């Protein structure tokens, strides 16, 4: 059994370009699917958030229309209720990749508010990448990589990855309301941004970096991490 660190946004809203606050947090499926897969394989999860705040789930992600039906929504709620780790996160500033077998970042729009500029997260990501251990990041959470820049240069430059695409941001009606998008800003880091069909599972593995495009990619991404941990 190994310990795996889940780094979760502490934001409950995302500030849009007109100054309004869009309610958000972490996306339920992106936490729950990997949580079920990894704990089901016998691994232990530790949750870290900025300042150890208890993370907020994006309530929209629990709607049956977004979760894939009534049964799927109930299963997500059951998983989140059972995940006591969500109620007692550690402070991200104290998290060290050396203590864990893998690091995973679930998305939701929350990271667009906090993790993209969080220095503690940036240091952790840099160390996790250098460790050679699995570093998995899904959907909007790859924007946390923006915090790894030093003098404009990121250690992730040259890596192949994916994240929530502009087409998907258009589909949810938020691209025109955003200051910037994950796809646009990550592209400025010198990474090779790739994409699959919108809303379909799509994952990319480049060395020890595992990325997924959207919520449907979270479960498959966890399975790829499990293959390495086995």
Image (cartoon, rainbow, N blue to C red):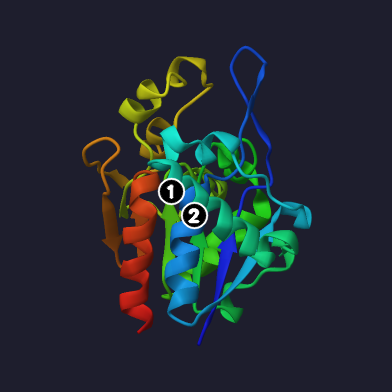
Q: Is residue 21 above or below residue 126?
A: above
Which is more toward the observer, 136 or 87? 87
Asked if disc 2 and disc 1 are in contact, CB closer than 8 Å, the reply is: yes
| Pointer 2 local density, CA inside 10 Å: few below 14, some 14–19, many at least 20 | some
Quarter occupied by residue 188: top left
Q: Name the residue under label 2.
A: 75
Q: Which residue is drawn at 41% across and 71% down?
A: 134
Dot 2: element = helix
Q: Which residue is drawn at 48% across and 82% down?
A: 42
Residue 93, x across and y down, in percent: 73, 62
- Left or right: 15 as drawn, with respect to 191: right
Q: In this view, does 228 lie above or below 70?
A: below
Q: Is residue 218 above or below residue 108?
A: below
- Left or right: 213 as drawn, with respect to 118: left
**The C terminus is located in which quarter?**
bottom left
The label shown at residue 140 is none
Residue 98 visible in image: yes
| Pointer 1 local density, CA inside 10 Å: few below 14, some 14–19, many at least 20 | few
Q: Mark 1 points at which residue?
A: 71
Q: Which residue is drawn at 47% across and 41% down?
A: 140
Residue 167, x across and y down, in percent: 31, 26
Quarter occupied by residue 13: top right
Farthest front residue in view: 71
Residue 218, x across and y down, in percent: 39, 54
């Amino acid at each position: 059994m190994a310990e795996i660190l889940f780094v979760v946004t502490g934001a409950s809203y995302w500030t849009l370009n007109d100054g309004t606050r869009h309610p958000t947090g972490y996306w339920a499926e992106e936490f729950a699917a990997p949580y079920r897969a990894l704990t089901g394989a016998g691994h232990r999860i530790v949750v870290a958030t900025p300042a150890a705040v208890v993370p907020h789930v994006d309530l929209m992600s629990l709607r049956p229309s977004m979760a894939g039906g009534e049964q799927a929504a109930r299963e997500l709620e059951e998983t989140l209720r059972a995940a006591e780790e969500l109620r007692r996160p550690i402070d991200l500033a104290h998290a060290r990749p050396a203590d864990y077998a893998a690091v995973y970042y679930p998305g939701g729009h929350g990271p667009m508010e906090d993790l993209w500029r969080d220095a503690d997260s940036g240091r952790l990501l840099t160390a996790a990448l250098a460790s050679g251990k699995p570093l998995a990041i899904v959907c909007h959470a790859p924007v946390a990589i923006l915090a790894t820049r030093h003098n404009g240069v990121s250690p992730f430059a040259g890596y192949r990855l994916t994240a929530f695409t502009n087409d998907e941001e258009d589909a949810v009606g938020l691209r025109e309301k955003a200051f910037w998008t994950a796809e646009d800003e990550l592209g400025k880091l010198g990474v090779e941004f790739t994409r699959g069909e919108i809303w379909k599972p799509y994952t990319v593995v480049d060395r020890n970096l595992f990325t997924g495009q959207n919520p449907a990619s979270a479960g498959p991404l966890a399975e790829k991490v499990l293959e390495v941990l086995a």
